[in-house]
Image: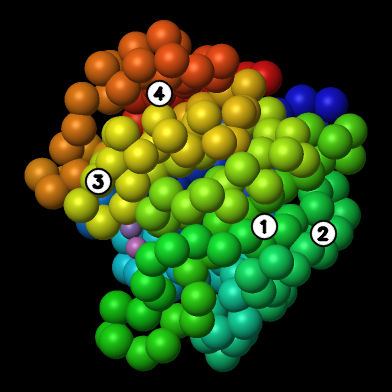
């Protein structure tokens, strides 16, 4: 078994689970931190947390080129399918075994309209469980909510949490989230892309080290971590 991931900037990650490639919220075009261009990405699954432009990003172009399957809420999956892309609809609380990984959608407290203003369903996070029961929680864009404790009770190895404030949890609430989830590792996301979400990530990482049992993993755009 193995899990590795690369931060592409903002909330975009590539992840490799047991040799299979997953792409999360691939906002690359127009992302000032984007580590690579959309034509450099490979994926079997593309997971979308919600319909906002800074998450859907280059999904359609990448899915068309790679044949990747889009996994998202029913409204987003339907939208993707209409553009000739394979998709799998899920919704909050629902899980599905996608072969090499089980994907469960969690709630997220945010909004989810497409860039043209049409309804994008409910925003979500994801819990990914590998064949050997390693578990990843990708929170998406969300406020802090106490049910994160329930997500953590199942045992979370790595939590990906937004820390950028203004649109999502800020550093203080993300620290509280780590205390509720109790992951082994925590990866911050959705920060420093734009002026509105600029935060002191090093200061936050110090607090995670001092005040929680989790190990923060701070990546530069393009940086990878192997578990
Ligand atoms: Ni959003
Ligand atoms: Mn966002």
Q: Are marks 2 and 1 in contact (CB under 8 Å)?
A: yes
Q: Give me the C-alpha separation between circle 3 and circle 4.
A: 18 Å
Q: Residue 226 appears at what percent x and percent y? A: 63, 20
Q: Is residue 110 left or right of residue 153?
A: left
Placement of the C terminus among the 4 image quadrants: top right
Q: Which circle's residue, 2 or 3, is located before the other in the chain? A: 2
Q: Residue 170 appears at what percent x and percent y? A: 28, 41
Q: How many marks?
A: 4
Circle 3 — which element? loop
Mark 3 highlights which residue?
Answer: 165
Q: Which circle's residue, 2 or 1, is located before the other in the chain? A: 1
Label 1 beta carbon within 8 A of ligand 2 = no
Query: What is the crowding at mark 3: few (fewer than 14 residues within 10 Å), some, or many (at least 20)?
Result: many
Placement of the N terminus among the 4 image quadrants: top right
Numbered tag placed on residue 13 in the rendering: none
Q: Are marks 1 and 4 in contact (CB under 8 Å)?
A: no
Q: Nearer the viewer, residue 181 or 189?
A: 181
Circle 1 — which element? strand
Q: Identify whether 202 is placed above or below 46.
A: above
Q: Give me the C-alpha separation between circle 2 and circle 1.
A: 9 Å
Mark 4 highlights which residue?
Answer: 219
């Amino acid at each position: 078994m193995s899990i590795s991931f690369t931060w592409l900037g903002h909330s975009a990650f590539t992840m490799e689970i047991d040799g299979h490639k997953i792409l999360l919220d691939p906002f690359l075009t127009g992302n000032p931190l984007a580590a690579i261009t959309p034509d450099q990405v490979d994926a079997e699954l593309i997971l979308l947390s919600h319909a906002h432009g800074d998450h859907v990003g280059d999904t359609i172009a990448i899915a068309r080129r790679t044949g990747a399957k889009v996994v998202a809420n029913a409204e987003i999956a339907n939208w993707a399918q209409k553009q000739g892309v394979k998709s799998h609809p899920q919704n909050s609380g629902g899980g599905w075994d996608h072969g090499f990984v089980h994907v469960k959608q969690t709630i997220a407290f945010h909004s989810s309209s497409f860039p043209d203003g049409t309804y994008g369903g409910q925003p979500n996070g994801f819990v990914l469980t590998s064949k050997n029961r390693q578990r990843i929680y990708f929170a998406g864009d969300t406020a802090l909510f106490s049910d994160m404790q329930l997500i953590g009770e199942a045992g979370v190895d790595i939590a990906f949490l937004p820390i950028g404030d203004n649109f999502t949890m800020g550093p203080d609430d993300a620290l509280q989230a780590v205390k509720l989830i109790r992951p082994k590792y925590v990866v911050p996301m959705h920060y420093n892309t734009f002026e509105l979400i600029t935060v002191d990530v090093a200061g936050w990482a110090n607090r995670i080290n001092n005040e929680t049992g989790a190990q923060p993993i701070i990546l530069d755009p393009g940086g990878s971590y192997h578990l």
